[in-house]
Amino acid sequence: MYATCRICSGSVKGTIDLGSHPRGNAFPKPGETADEFFYPLVVGMCDSCTMVQLMADIPQEVRYHDSYPYYASGSSVHRGHFEGIAQGFLDTELTGPDPFIAEIGSNDGVMLAKIAQAGVRHLGIEPSRHVAELSMAKGVRVHSVFFDEHSARPIRAEHGPADVIFGANVIAHIAHLASVLKGVKHLLGPRGIFVFEEPYLGSVVEQTAFDLLYDEHSFVFSVRAIQAAAEMYGLELVDAQLVAIHGGSMRYTLSQPGAREVTPGVGELLAAEAAQRLAEHSTLEAFAGRAERIRDDLSALLGSLHAQGKRIAGYGAPAKTTTVTNYCGIGPDIVPFVSDSTPSKQGRLIAGSHIPVVPPEVFAADYPDYALLFAWNHAEEIIAKERAFSERGGRWILYVPDVHVI
Ligand code: TMP
Ligand code: ZN
């Protein structure tokens, strides 16, 4: 199976085929599952620019609808992380006269609220109206549009060039990334930086995090592919740093060409990627084989526990839950509910697998024997928070990088 690369128009070879899947963040209501949208979840790499991407095209309006349920503030670790990023910008890049920072996909304002408090000129660009409203309540200025080469023009005309353009867990979502890079090129000031952090291909491959593949992740970035994409659209990759969030992310910094010194980290990471053979189709094929192994092991473990009469609950309903439950055939017969702290997900179902999402109080009221930790990227925070569950003999099931019980 081949598709056309969204970055360079080269040829993308589909190597990871996880079958037919619904949208990760659809969360249908009970009784509203008749017309669920399914698409083939196949991911591959471009032969030319090495960008790893989803083969299917899914209209973005279908994904970032007005009731988009993801809140970036949902985890205290993430809140601290984004407040730290905001403080870092305030201390370094936003110290000149009347600086300006724009954030693509500002979500509920977790990062920009701190910038707003400091009285610095800013603009959140967030098409999902519900989360945009949450950020406005925090004093954040928001423009509700999809960022691209067209919407960048009136933004620059009104606000002037940006000292910083930021994006977290959003740039890899945008299928029209080429147009975003053109928009960034236009909006970014001569000394400005475009900083974004996204799940990292090297970490996804290393951990066999197959559940990070879903409709919203149009791309899984590598340093090499971002360097190539930046160059193609008149920008330069000047820094890359690993970030321990979402199970392994990379923070990329782009500038206008020649505006900033390229840090040694870029070359070091490129060398590490070459050693990991990250730009080879065979690496993705091997990944697909390991994902199948996890699927078989997890199905076998859950089936055996169920047969022994053990009670199993799901914990955390990130979009990843949709991929893993549908790929592994896990339904409410084996996992009767998933506990999640996000109010807008509660009372709804995991798309496709139709496991009900309930508030954490339901989990705490009657602890199961096992909790399948779908939000494994928050394992430390969640396991610490749910100490009472472990103390009463409850066990956690994890499936990344392999199936294990703790
Ligand atoms: P994320 O992996 O995309 O950040 O999503 C994590 C999901 O897990 C989100 O729906 C909120 C949920 N969650 C809990 O239910 N309890 C928790 O303690 C944490 C940290 C997250
Ligand atoms: Zn390409």
Image (spheres, rainbow, N blue to C red):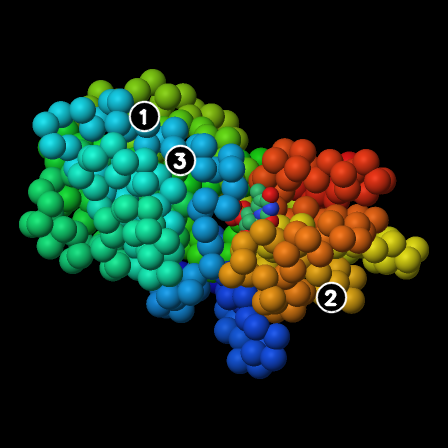
Q: CA distance from mark 2 to mark 3?
A: 35 Å
- Residue type highlighted by circle 1: Gly
Residue 82, which numbered label? 3
Could you tell me the amino acid type at mark 3? Answer: Phe
Callout 1–callout 2 Cβ contact below 8 Å? no
Q: Earlier in the sequence, mark 1 or mark 3?
A: 3
- Cα–Cα span, label 1 and label 2: 44 Å
Instruction: State which mark lies toward you, 2 or 3.
Output: 3
Instruction: Identify which residue is drawn at 66% across, 65% down.
Output: 356
Q: Residue furthest left?
A: 157
Q: In the depicted view, which residue is nearer to us: 28 or 20?
A: 28
Residue farthest toward the right in the current orientation of the protein: 308
Query: At numbered mark 3, what does the secondary structure look like: helix, strand or loop?
Result: helix
Which residue position holds label 1?
A: 88
Instruction: Identify the image quadrant of residue 12.
Output: bottom left
Q: Is residue 296 visible?
A: no
Q: Nearer the viewer, residue 244 or 348?
A: 348
Residue 247 in the image: above or below residue 11: above
List x then y, in percent, for residue 393. 85, 40
Instruction: Give the x, y percent position of residue 122.
Output: 21, 41
Q: Nearer the viewer, residue 403 or 338?
A: 338
Name which of mark 1 and mark 2 comes first in the sequence: 1
- Horizontally, residue 196 falls left or right of residue 322, namely left
User: Which residue is label 2 attached to?
Assistant: 332
